[in-house]
């Protein structure tokens, strides 16, 4: 096992001018040594334009996570599918010995207009399952895992069973989750299927309520024989709220998931730094400490099989590329990811490497 000093030295060498990459223990290598998969959301549109970006992804990741598999992207008109972009991503991943993860099949924020216009009931259920069947059959044998249902929970406004009020709940009904997983399993029996959600890691009352709701939902799915293999925890962390992270509470929750026989995926890991100091020399260690604390607890549980960073470089994280509540108010660029905009590793990189290196073998 590499020591913390080894990892820090390697990262420092990586940042030095004219240094080579050969001595760097990449995150992919560290994860593989512990029986884990490490991956990233990859921007397929950048791969052909920026060789350094592709080299970084291939070196650091053995899992390619696509954001191009949304319902509205793949079936913009009913019965008319556009799968070429994802075919290209899978070809690139295969050429670089990377597995492929699709995020995600069913999400209320990415729905084509034609589906929203359906009357609902049986026709909507058929349209949803037909979409999943076509997509999963087309990519069968090429996909390691799918986020089948994303962000299906919300605890307000009296939603049925704590389910988020989405077009799928409105058009199909509360059994849309069961239907989606069954369709995906039938279309590709070998792909791993997960339910992905956020707001589950902190010692806050609404996180606790959501944890209870998720466990109740999973118990119902399991009782009905719905084929679900894993739970995806989005892992969007923040310097503003991480003071509410309680190692014992989070560890207990992971044990609850594992005791039900589910694998656990950390699916969209990053650290928002909206209220962190402007001085990078102060800010970066705070971000790194959050990565270290979170991953140390999570990876201690052997049911955690997969870690996905939501991008590797600060160039293309969603916080830095869109208007949202997590952008810094001082005009400084956010630094939520392991690599900076020049593709150089930061203290966050060392923290992730240390956590992977210290994880018990799977």
Image (cartoon, rainbow, N blue to C red):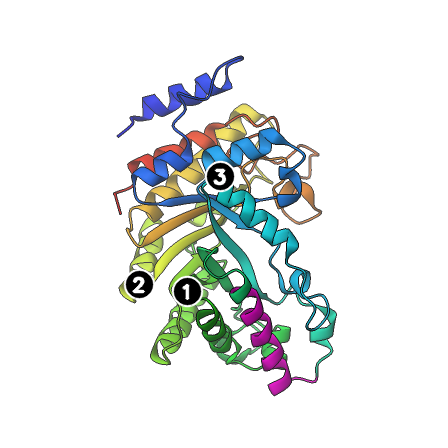
Question: Which residue is pictured at 61% across the width and 30% down the height?
Answer: 51
Left of 160 or right of it: where is 329?
right
Label 1, label 2: how far apart the Cα atoms are? 10 Å
Q: Are marks 1 and 2 in contact (CB under 8 Å)?
A: yes
Label 1, label 3: how far apart the Cα atoms are? 37 Å
- Image location (x, y in percent) of residue 257: 33, 62
Instruction: Quickly name the residue at label 2.
Output: 256
Residue sitting nearer the eye, 136 or 29:
136
Instruction: Quickly name the residue at label 3.
Output: 96
Question: Which residue is pictured at 44% across the width and 50% down the height?
Answer: 244
Q: Nearer the viewer, mark 1 or mark 2?
A: 2
Question: Which residue is pictured at 39% across the width and 45% down the height?
Answer: 37
Question: Tag 3: Cα neighbours inside 10 Å, few (<14), some, or many (≥20)?
Answer: some
Which stretch is magenta? 119-136
Residue 265 lies, with reference to residue 44, above or below; the image says below
Residue 23 lies, with reference to residue 46, above or below; the image says above
Helix, strand or loop for the magenta stretch, by majority? helix
Tell me the element at label 3: loop
Instruction: Quickly name the residue at label 1.
Output: 211
Give the mark nearest the N terminus, 1 or 2.
1
- Image location (x, y in percent) of residue 285: 47, 29
Residue 168 lies, with reference to residue 43, above or below; the image says below
Question: Tag 1: Cα neighbours inside 10 Å, few (<14), some, or many (≥20)?
Answer: many
Q: Does residue 40 appear anywhere in the picture?
A: no
């Amino acid at each position: 096992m590499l020591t913390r000093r080894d990892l820090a030295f390697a990262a420092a060498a990586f940042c030095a001018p004219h240094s080579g990459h050969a001595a760097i223990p990449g995150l992919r290598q560290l994860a593989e040594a512990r029986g884990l998969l490490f991956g990233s959301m990859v921007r397929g549109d950048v791969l052909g334009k920026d060789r350094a970006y592709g080299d970084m992804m291939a070196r650091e990741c053995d899992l390619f996570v696509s954001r191009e598999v949304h319902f509205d992207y793949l079936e913009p008109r009913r019965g008319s599918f556009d799968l070429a972009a994802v075919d290209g991503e899978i070809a690139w991943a295969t050429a670089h010995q990377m597995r492929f993860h699709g995020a995600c099949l069913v999400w209320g924020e990415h729905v084509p207009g034609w589906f929203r216009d359906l009357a609902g009931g049986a026709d909507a259920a058929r349209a949803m399952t037909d979409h999943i069947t076509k997509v999963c059959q087309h990519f069968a044998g090429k996909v390691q895992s799918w986020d089948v249902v994303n962000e299906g929970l919300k605890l307000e406004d009296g939603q049925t069973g704590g389910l988020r009020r989405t077009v799928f709940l409105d058009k199909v009904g509360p059994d849309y989750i069961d239907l989606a997983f069954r369709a995906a399993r039938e279309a590709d029996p070998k792909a791993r299927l997960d339910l992905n959600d956020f707001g589950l890691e902190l010692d806050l009352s609404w996180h606790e309520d959501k944890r209870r709701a998720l466990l109740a939902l999973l118990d119902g799915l399991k009782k009905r024989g719905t084929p679900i293999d894993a739970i995806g925890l989005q892992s969007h962390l923040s310097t503003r709220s991480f003071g509410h992270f309680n190692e014992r509470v989070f560890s207990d929750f992971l044990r609850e998931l594992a005791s039900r026989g589910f694998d656990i995926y950390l699916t969209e890991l990053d650290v928002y730094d909206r209220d962190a100091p402007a001085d990078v020399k102060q800010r970066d260690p705070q971000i790194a400490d959050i990565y270290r604390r979170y991953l140390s607890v999570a990876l201690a549980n052997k049911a955690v099989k997969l870690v996905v960073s939501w991008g590797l470089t600060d160039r293309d994280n969603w916080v830095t590329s869109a208007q949202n509540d997590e952008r810094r108010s001082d005009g400084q660029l956010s630094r939520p990811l392991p690599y900076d905009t020049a593709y150089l590793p930061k203290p966050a990189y060392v923290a992730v490497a240390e956590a992977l290196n210290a994880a018990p073998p799977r």
